[in-house]
Amino acid sequence: MEGQVSALSAVTLPSGTPTEPMSRTARLHRWNDPRLTSTPVIAGLPALLTLLVAGIGLGGRQLWRDEHASWWAAMLSYPDLIELLRSRDVVFAPYYGGLHLWTAVFGDSAPALRLPSLLWMASAAALVALLGRRLYGAPTGLTAGLLFALLPIVSRYAAEARPYAQVIALTTASSLLLLRALERPSRLRWVAYALAVAATGLSHLVALTVLVAHAVPVLRETRRLPHREVLRRAAPWAAATGAGLVVVAPMAYLGSRQSGQISWIDEPTWAGVLKLPANLAGSVAVAAVLLVLALIGVTAGRWPALLLGAWVLTGPLLALATFDQFQLFFFRYLLYTVPAWVLLAAAGTLRVARAVGGGRARAAAVAVVLITVAVLGLPRQQMFRSDLVEDEHGFRDAGAFVAAQAAPGDGIVFDGYRHLRRAMAYELRDADPRPVDVLLAQPAQERGSYAAAECRKPAECLGDVRRVWLVTTQGGTDPLRRVDGARGAALRDRFVVARVAQFHRIRVVELVASR
């Protein structure tokens, strides 16, 4: 690619006689200190910055509902997990299986659950930098890696027990491995690429749209060859891609049968489409900077721009076109495009820097862009470390209150929010004593589901329990009266309200036996 051409043009022959005069691209890259172009520096600095920035407050905010699902699935035995995946979330099977092994070693605290995502995101930053070096040269690669590390969206999903950081890293890895295989083809390199394609699809099926972008460098390699030679040169890529897709095919088939799970995603509007860049950056202000720089970056090289443009656009456009069938236009499913945005923006940054002047002036221009992104993204960085991220109910505070007040023989009942039982199961997992879920008839794992089945005759299931902790998301001045159906009737018949503790969008009501 252009970065490789520039590096080759600077080689000196053994006799000491320089090769042909350096290309314009090579001259532009000389302003960087050669010590900063080594792989450990190019990859290591962005990875370390990601660990530093995204690692701050890793366990500070409580888990939210999707992370509770990750925890629940990871804590299941493998037979129970397989039963769950028969009807739910089969597309996350590799992630849940890996998290199961991880928690067996490192536990299920919030930092432990999120640490794999942090490590994946740090790897993604390193891979973005290496891919940028291969496409444009070392200065652009390093800039891209550092820019990626500073994005608010990177901090959020590096600190979330979900597979999106893994998807970003694997998508970038597959792109880098493709370029390496095209540069110096070998059986081992094509096998590595095939495995990366499979891993990308297994981490998230939507990310496979990056294969459209992968066709761009293949076409570049074969565009001037005779037809027979084209087939010979493109055959390894086609075979590797096909092998990767064969591995993914069973999960894709099973996932298509569970598409009703995401029927909650709203039909996209023009307003939603226009918000996509801000959602992918994690900040409106940061997205504006990236968009301007990316547009400039398009002019930095035709083939890199085509590759990255296809990476950026194919997924969203396909998700829009097929929304009625698959309901996939949702920003979290398109996070794998973030590296392409960043690489284009980094190319634009270097193009602006070159226009500023030489040496230190260019380095200063790059630093200004990085600092600007860091400052503009700071409010969202702070927000992403708070429980306001999804405006979830105050599960952690409610759980801590119940754990501190509960006594042996106490019961617990849930009302309102449908994921409440799972959320409180996480918050009370280490409570001793732990209140008994008195209305639980069949645990979720026995049903192959995330949701448990409740007792159909609550009055009988309450037994002789004398105190119940009602955890509810219902409003009103009389929380006990808001509990409906047979469950509410049974509670009102047996208990009176002793006290009410209010937390964010959730209340804990102490009910004591009235007779």
Image (cartoon, rainbow, N blue to C red):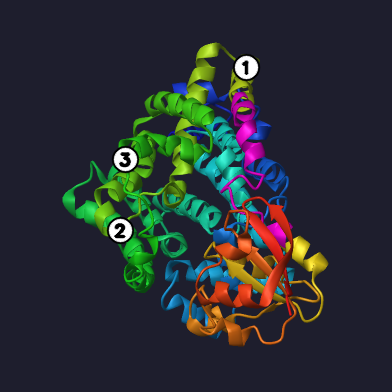
Residue with the mark numbered 1:
359
Residue with the mark numbered 3:
269
Residue at 50% of width from left, 30% of height from top? Answer: 284
**Residue 302 at x, y percent in the picture:** 34, 31
Check disc 1 and report its element: helix, strand or loop.
loop
Say which amino acid is labelled 3.
Thr
Report how far apart the C-alphas of labels 1 and 3 lie in the structure. 46 Å
**Residue 210 at x, y percent in the picture:** 37, 50
Give the number of the mark in front: 1 or 2.
2
Residue that lies at the very extreme toward the top in this rendered image: 357
Mark 1 and mark 3 residues within 8 Å of each other at the beta carbon? no
406 relative to 237, above or below: below
Residue that lies at the very extreme toward the left in this rendered image: 227
Check disc 2 and report its element: helix, strand or loop.
helix
The boundaries of the magenta stretch are 372-398
Image quadrant containing the N terminus: top left
Front residue of this view, candidates 396 and 31: 396
Give the number of the mark in front: 3 or 2.
3
**Mark 3 packing: few (<14 Cα in 10 Å), some, or many (20+)?**
few
User: How many numbered discs sit on the rendered protein?
Assistant: 3
Residue at 18% of width from left, 54% of height from top? Answer: 228
Front residue of this view, candidates 305 and 272: 272
Residue with the mark numbered 2:
326
Q: Is residue 377 magenta?
A: yes
Q: Is residue 343 magenta?
A: no
